[in-house]
Image: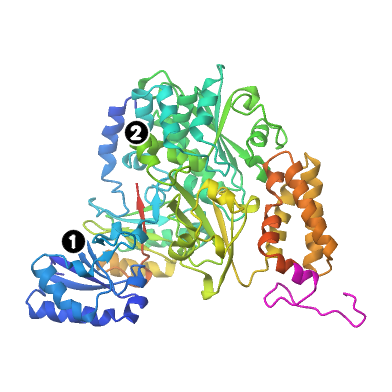
């Protein structure tokens, strides 16, 4: 579809706004649970692709079809790659660091299914976004 | 889990536990239970708030009130006053060190305000391969606004008024560059994005292109509209395959959505972008060399003037801006120049992304408003030096910059102040050195880099850097003499003064600044004294006083 005016652009923005809940500080309003995996060069080189695949596989096995796994860029926490952010409706997003593929199971069991964040992986986010 | 009306977060980080936060949490729990509120108020132990100096920290949500230095005895007051009656306990609020006024919201405390993300606003939060996520985050609105509601002059004026300066290192005002290119009379003009990021240890541009490629495309279209160019070129090094593939995806999606191509937003402005791959030569980050490389010639710089704005790509007026500069543009258009110029210092507005590397705990990317100090970046945001060792120096500006030492740590970061203390802003790489690093070796490392990267066009740079490297090699292998030191110093200034482009003019900076700040380390090597933590094994002279 070609966007030909500012109004059209804004309409698309409204349509898709729920898909991007400005995932930083705000509580999620989307219906879907989302898992954002940092897949810039730094993430991939520390194993983000394996983490990403592990999420997809395990979610498929567990038949958690309403959970979406999304690739995103680098959040700047290269010291703790791979980074994973979990957005669950009505909760503040949680940013995890050092999520290797071995840790995926624990994250899905405890956080996605159980609703309890896995504290030892949590990174504190100390920035604001315009 | 029952729905709680209120959460009391008590910091359970090591720092706060050391100052007895566990007792605070326990007292809070006991008192809440005694008052009968334990069904609706829960006490949660959290990870470190990063504000250990003021611990123990207690935060009440959803009120978003932030208490510091809470003692076990204060628990009763917090429960009775805040949780039951809903009144803030003024005495426990954090007081601003400057005006001593109590601050209740965490966001208002200076420490947490250090990082502000403008250029990195979408990195890590949207899917870079989905244009709709970018649009949902407010993307392409700035382009629409510029094309339909602003004249070309207004766009240029807006950028000029914002005070945005080139983020690639030069610091030339972006609005002025656009204005000069706009004023040129020519039917064909070009706008080029410089994504030839070559400093060792710098990866800001790569992260932006990998995490938010559309912001650069949008900004290039805005720039094209402002200066009157209908073609954009992204010059990107071939070593960034992921960034290239995401850019290609982004360009395809933008064309499909009609956001690149003919008659954007129904106006008569058309704009398209092509990608040009660089072979990774450092000198191609210099704009005239970059243009030569784009044309398929050798990547060698030209003498300026004429500036690219007058005669650039194939002789046409060309505007070259850096990736990070572009990433700032859409926000300036949507939020206005006034907002942007409210951030930063008098002559450097906005924020800057830095890549922290070296002996620092939190290696990574940070974006801070101009005017924060190096100390804040290293110790607050960067988490201090690895292994608790002592800070020795920080190299800013990559191989073109200089080292800054302890005494410069309280310098406010902006283009001018960094030049004053003998370094430069550069593109944003920051390499931290600790007490175990030998500074002469650091200088040698950078010299080796510039020697390799010298394009060979002018003699001072081609031969000068090579000779300087040889001298440094002799000195670090403990065979140097005082005469070598003199020669090195003299040569450094000759290369600095005699070179054609920025590469040669700045190549000696690491040597000059380490000589200035760490002269003793040079002397130690000449006198062949054992530096306690110098690099390599100390080999004493043999019996006849000759080095083996």
Q: Is residue B455 visible?
A: no
Residue under label 2:
B141
* Magenta: main secondary structure: loop
Give above or below for B456 relative to A44.
above
Q: Is residue B415 visible?
A: yes
Q: Quadrant of the C terminus of chain B?
A: bottom right
Dividing the picture into quarters, in which one does residue B43 lie? bottom left
Residue under label 1:
B62
Question: Going 25% across and 59% down the picture, which residue do you hit?
Answer: B105
- Image coordinates for residue B192, horizontal then vertical, percent: 55, 33
- Near mark 1 (Cα within 10 A), the count class, few <14, some 14-19 or many ≥20, is few
Q: Say whether residue B20 is left or right of residue B484.
A: left
- Image coordinates for residue A23, horizontal then vertical, percent: 31, 52
Question: Going 32% across and 76% down the picture, which residue do you hit?
Answer: B16
Is B547 colored magenta in this rendering?
A: yes
- Image coordinates for residue B242, horizontal then vertical, percent: 53, 48
Secondary-structure class at tag 2? helix
């Amino acid at each position: 579809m070609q966007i030909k005016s500012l109004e059209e652009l804004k309409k698309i923005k409204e349509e898709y706004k729920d898909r991007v809940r400005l995932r930083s500080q705000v509580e999620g309003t989307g219906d879907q649970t989302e898992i954002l995996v940092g897949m810039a060069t730094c993430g991939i080189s520390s194993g983000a692709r394996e983490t990403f695949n592990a999420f997809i596989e395990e979610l498929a096995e567990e038949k958690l079809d309403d959970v979406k796994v999304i690739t995103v860029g680098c959040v700047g926490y290269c010291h703790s790659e791979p980074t994973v952010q979990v957005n669950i409706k009505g909760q503040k997003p949680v940013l995890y660091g050092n999520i290797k593929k071995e840790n995926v199971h624990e994250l899905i069991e405890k956080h996605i299914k159980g609703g309890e964040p896995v504290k030892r992986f949590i990174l504190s986010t100390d920035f604001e976004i315009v | 889990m029952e729905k709680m009306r209120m959460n009391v977060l008590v910091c359970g980080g090591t720092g706060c536990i050391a100052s007895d936060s566990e007792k605070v949490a326990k007292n809070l729990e006991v008192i809440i239970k005694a008052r009968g509120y334990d069904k609706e108020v829960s006490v949660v132990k959290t990870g470190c708030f990063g504000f250990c100096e003021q611990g123990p920290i207690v935060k009440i949500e959803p009120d978003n009130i932030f208490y510091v230095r809470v003692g076990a005895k204060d628990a009763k007051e917090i429960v009775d006053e805040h949780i039951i009656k809903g009144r803030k306990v003024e005495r426990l609020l954090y007081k601003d060190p400057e005006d001593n006024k109590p601050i209740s919201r965490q966001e208002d405390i200076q420490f947490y305000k250090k990082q502000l993300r403008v250029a990195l606003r979408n990195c890590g939060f949207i899917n870079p391969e989905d244009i709709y996520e970018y649009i949902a985050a407010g993307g392409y609105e700035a382009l629409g606004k510029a094309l339909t509601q602003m004249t070309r002059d207004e766009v240029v004026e807006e950028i000029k008024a914002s005070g945005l300066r080139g983020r690639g290192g030069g610091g030339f005002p972006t609005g002025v560059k656009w204005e000069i290119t706009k004023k040129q009379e020519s039917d064909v003009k070009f706008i080029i994005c410089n994504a030839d990021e070559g400093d060792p240890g710098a990866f800001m541009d790569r992260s932006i292109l990998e995490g938010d490629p559309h912001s650069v495309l949008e900004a290039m279209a805005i720039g094209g509209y402002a200066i009157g160019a209908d073609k954009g070129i992204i010059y990107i090094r071939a070593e960034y395959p992921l960034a290239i593939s995401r850019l290609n995806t982004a360009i395809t999606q933008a064309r499909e959505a009609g956001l690149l191509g003919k008659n954007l937003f129904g106006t008569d402005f058309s704009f398209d972008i092509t990608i040009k791959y660089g072979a990774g030569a450092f000198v191609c980050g210099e704009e005239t060399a970059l243009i030569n490389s784009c044309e398929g010639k050798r990547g060698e710089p030209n003498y300026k003037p004429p500036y690219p704005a007058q005669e650039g790509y194939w002789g046409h007026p060309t505007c070259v801006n850096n990736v990070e500069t572009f990433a700032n543009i859409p926000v300036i258009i949507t939020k206005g120049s006034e907002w942007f110029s409210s951030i930063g210092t008098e002559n450097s507005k906005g924020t800057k992304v830095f890549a922290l590397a070296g002996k620092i705990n939190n290696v990574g990317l940070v974006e801070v408003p101009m005017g924060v100090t190096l100390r804040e970046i290293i110790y607050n945001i960067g988490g201090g030096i690895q292994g608790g060792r002592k800070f020795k120096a920080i190299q800013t500006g990559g191989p073109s910059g200089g080292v800054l030492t302890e005494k410069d740590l309280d310098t406010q970061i902006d283009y001018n102040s960094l030049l004053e203390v003998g370094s430069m802003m550069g593109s944003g790489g920051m390499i931290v050195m600790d007490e175990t690093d030998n500074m002469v070796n650091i200088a040698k490392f950078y010299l080796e880099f510039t020697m390799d990267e010298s394009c060979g066009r002018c003699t001072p740079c081609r031969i000068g850097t090579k000779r300087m490297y040889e001298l440094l090699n002799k000195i670090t292998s403990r065979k140097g003499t005082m005469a070598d030191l003199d020669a090195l110093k003299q040569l450094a200034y000759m290369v600095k003064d005699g070179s054609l482009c920025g590469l040669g003019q700045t190549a000696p900076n690491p040597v000059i600044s380490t000589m200035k700040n760490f002269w003793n380390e040079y002397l130690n090597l000449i006198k062949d004294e054992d530096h306690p933590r110098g690099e390599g094994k100390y080999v004493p002279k043999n019996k006849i006083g000759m080095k083996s």
